[in-house]
Image: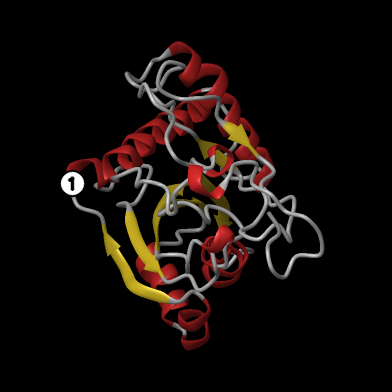
Amino acid sequence: MRVQGTAGFFTLGVPPDQYDLPHPRLGLPVILFLRRVLLRAFAKLRDRGFPLATEREDSVTEQLFNVLENDLRQTGEIGGFNPIFYERVVRHAQVTNYNGQKLAKTPDLSFKLRDAGAERRPVVSSHDALFVECKPVDAGHAAGTAYCDDGLLGFVNGDYAWAMQEAMMLAYVRNGRTIAEHLTPAMAASNRRASLRIVRPLEVCPGLAAAPCAEAESVHLTQHRRNFPWPDGKGLATDITVYHLWHRCS
């Protein structure tokens, strides 16, 4: 299969009639369950004395990944998050963008549910996961530039999660930054509203599992229109819903 606009041959490794786009929704219960898992991982880092307030983004992500994969998933401490239901958590998995022109896009974390069904799901397995971008939001990393332009935009442009209908942004928040005071106005700027193609502005997710707690704000979501073509003539990419988890790291 050759995709128009690429310099060379690009294949997803599966014939077009054997996968569907978009991939099935993960659903809000899965998103909120993984929020619970992430909250527990942050709590363990605090208990072990990891300096969330001062460490760099890559260090926080690496240690968060270590707890998620080597502790929580292996022990099954949180019921349902174990090797039976989830494959290995991946950090910086290299994936291609929607047309194969970018060969090594690296979302910070990805969670992949195991297929419990008897028949293979009609998906592109390497692109079927909850992809998570992690970004600091503090005095040196603005919600508009670092979080939106360097992080969120990748989901809108099809750099990663291009086959999915949902994705997640995870903020390491310091210096009292909040969604209301920093992310909302950043997204409201006219240039960013256009580049992010926002069709559903920031709103709080429903349910107690999305509620604020001492360590994190309420889970918020936005919806974005994507205007790139899917491979194999599968049409124009559908909208993507992005969940925003802002965790206090001060």
- Category of crowding for the residue at label 1, using alpha-carbon neighbours closer than 10 angstroms: few (below 14), some (14–19), many (at least 20): few
**Residue 89 image point, x, y percent:** 55, 29
Q: In the rendering, at what x and y percent does residue 86 appear? A: 45, 25
Q: Where is mark 1, residue-wise?
A: 207
The residue drawn where x is 32% and y is 38% is 30
Residue 239: x percent and y percent? Answer: 40, 65
Q: Between 109 and 163, which is closer to the camera in this rendering?
A: 163
- The number of numbered badges drawn on the structure is 1
Q: Tell me the kind of residue under disc 1.
A: Gly
Looking at the image, the residue that sits furthest to the bottom is 190
- Assign a secondary structure to mark 1: loop
Indicate left or right for 205 with 146 as reference: left
Residue 135 placement (x, y as % from top left): 57, 54
Q: Residue at x 38, y 36 (%)?
A: 34
Please determine whether, in this image, residue 36 is positioned above or below residue 70. Answer: below
Examine the rendering and report whether any part of residue 98 can be seen.
Answer: yes
Residue 62 position by quadrant? top right
Residue found at the far top of this picture: 75
The residue at the point 53 percent across, 56 percent down is 162
Look at the picture and state if 118 lies above or below 139: above
Q: Residue furthest left?
A: 207
- Residue 130 visible at all: no
Q: Residue at x 50, y 14 (%)?
A: 74
Of the pair 142 and 206, the residue shown nearer to us: 206
Where the N terminus falls, by quadrant?
bottom right
